Amino acid sequence: MDLPVWQALYEELKGHGFVVITVALDKSADDARPWIEAARPAHPSLIDTRHVLADLYNIVNVPTVLWIDAQGRIVRPNDVTFATDTFKHVTGLESARPLAAIRAWARGETSALPTEDARRLQTLPSASDQQARAEFGLGQWLWERGQRDAAERHFVRAGELAPHDFTIRRGTMPMRGIDPMGPEFRRMLQAWKDAGQPYYRPLPDLPG
């Protein structure tokens, strides 16, 4: 987790009314707790074990950032934003530009996306996506009750219904005893890329 970077950004911009809320999508609170306790963030830092955030905002990969204004409106929908350049050699995405855009927006130096553009760029879940979420939730419920074989069937079905949703496909791996950064994940990712699909889909026309 890149909590130190987001904490520093919060400290830098909080005088402008800027608030950071970081959320970890993990199978249990204990998975993310050590990172949060080590960073000691002063901003709200949450652990979402039910993928509620992913359901509400149709988040299909991490790291994802949303800009929400003082009126509670999404003014820049789900966007890939790395806080550091640790994985730049893999993703080809740098952190400096999106972080600079956030700073400019928080300081009032630039505006967010126009309402029409924000709506156009906000992806909505399809019927298959929603069924995949239901399959994932049922699989998690079964897994928590020790019914691992039954859970596995629903986890697999969720991935089949929404192959682009890596919060589901990777999210099931720790519950299935699979390293979410290990060989099986790398094989899955390579097959996805070999099919001509991008792993990350940054939004265009970043303000600032």
Image (spheres, rainbow, N blue to C red):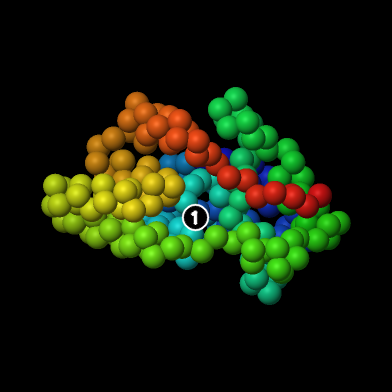
Taking the spot 45% from the left edge, 58% from the top edge, the residue there is 54
Is any part of residue 171 visible from this angle? no
Residue 153 percent coordinates (x, y): 19, 49
* On screen, residue 119 above or below 170: below
Q: Quadrant of residue 180?
A: top left
> Callout 1: few (<14), some (14-19), or many (20+) C-alpha neighbours within 10 Å?
many
Please name whichever residue, 38 or 157, is drawn nearer the observer in this view of the structure. Answer: 157
Please name whichever residue, 199 or 146, is drawn nearer the observer in this view of the structure. Answer: 199
In the picture of the structure, the residue carrying the numbered disc 1 is: 59
* Element assignment for label 1: loop
* On screen, residue 179 above or below 135: above
- At label 1, the amino acid type is Ile
Taking the spot 54% from the left edge, 45% from the top edge, the residue there is 63
Is any part of residue 187 visible from this angle? yes
Q: Quadrant of residue 190?
A: top left
Taking the spot 34% from the left edge, 57% from the top edge, the residue there is 132
Residue 89 percent coordinates (x, y): 60, 25
Please name whichever residue, 204 or 5, is drawn nearer the observer in this view of the structure. Answer: 204
* On screen, residue 74 above or below 159: below
In the displayed structure image, the side of residue 182 where residue 20 appears, left or right: right
Taking the spot 65% from the left edge, 70% from the top edge, the residue there is 73
